[in-house]
Amino acid sequence: MALWKTAYRMLAPGGRRGKLLIFIFHQVLREPDPLRPYEPDAEQFDWMVQHIARNFSVLPLADAAARLAAGSLPPAAACITFDDGYRNNAELALPILRRHGAVATFFVASGFLGQGRMWNDDLIEAVRQLGSADADWRAYGLGVHRLTTPADRLQCLADVLPRLKYFPHAERASVAREVARAAGVAEESSMMMEAEHLAQLIASGMEIGAHTHSHPILGQIGPEEARAEVARGRSELERMTGHPIRLFAYPNGDTRRDLGQRDVDLVRDLGFACAVITDPGFAVAATNPYLLPRFTPWDRTPGRFAMRCSMALAGRL
């Protein structure tokens, strides 16, 4: 273990030569889910956090961003972040974070709190409900998909989720919900956090950040709607928590197609301290604080995970 700590500190020595590695997660599952192979289960997340906490200097994002700009990062500086606001963040991830003495930032789309499922989860649950029956979604512009084997089901999701993601914002949610309803998926769900979970996270020393209200791709909506989404997401979280919200994560967050300079300027002008994207990499002092890259750790064995972290700090992702 000391070998990795030494390696990370050599790659990210701190100070003015510091590098900030920001980990991004979405869910922590109670047990492995064949339809969500890129989401760690609790056992996997436990050793991931243990590795991060033992070998990196884990900082709250607000503190890390300020120290990055000031050139005062500790060696091997890292942050842990979560997007969207899933209930399992509070019920499963939080106890693991606390056990290892790690802090994290949770970016929450306020409109989904206590409101069932996000559009992508509607699609995943529809595939689960259909079992081995074919999915005929031609009426929604999503084609026909064989679901005979587990590989078929994963391929269906790999084909459909990226396509539906870029439907017009309101249409995306309504199509996903109709697909789920037609497949027999129950309307009720407890996948997302409630306001009480936000309070629990804050009481445990975690940070809450904004992630818009209804998770639109900002680059695909008009400027007034974009401003309203960002402002509403923050104001609702502030009302629920009683705390100022100064951190932001762009929905989807890929600078190649999901946001532009207008959106970066908007987030800055609304008074956020910093913002994160999903472009892979690490941040240095010269990085725009409203375009902080993040790293998605998809490896599922400790050795490969550790190697991936070193590759990220070496700029070899």
Image (cartoon, rainbow, N blue to C red):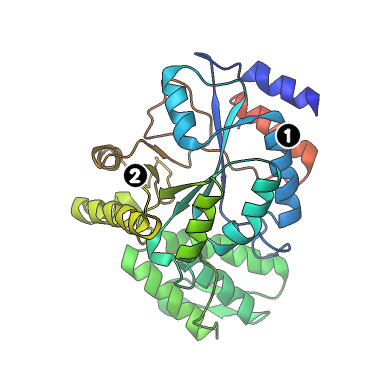
Name the image quarter holding residue 149.
bottom right
**In the drawing, does residue 296 fall left or right of residue 221?**
right
**In the drawing, does residue 68 fall left or right of residue 29?**
left
Quadrant location, the N terminus: top right
Residue 284 drawn above or below residue 197:
above
User: Residue 85: image x %, image y %?
Assistant: 49, 58
Specify the amino acid type for callout 2: Leu
The residue depicted at 66 percent of the width and 19 percent of the height is 9
User: Residue 169: image x %, image y %?
Assistant: 33, 63
Front position among marks 1 and 2: 1
Specify the amino acid type for callout 1: Ala
Q: Which residue is mark 1?
A: 306
Query: Which class describes the residues within 10 Å of circle 2: few (<14), some (14-19), or many (20+)?
Result: many
Q: Is residue 39 visible?
A: no
The residue depicted at 56 percent of the width and 76 percent of the height is 126
Residue 179 drawn above or below residue 172:
below
Q: Which residue is mark 2?
A: 259
Disc 1, SS: helix
Quadrant location, the C terminus: top right
Q: Between residue 165 and residue 61, name the one nearer to us.
A: 61
Sequence-wise first label, 1 or 2: 2
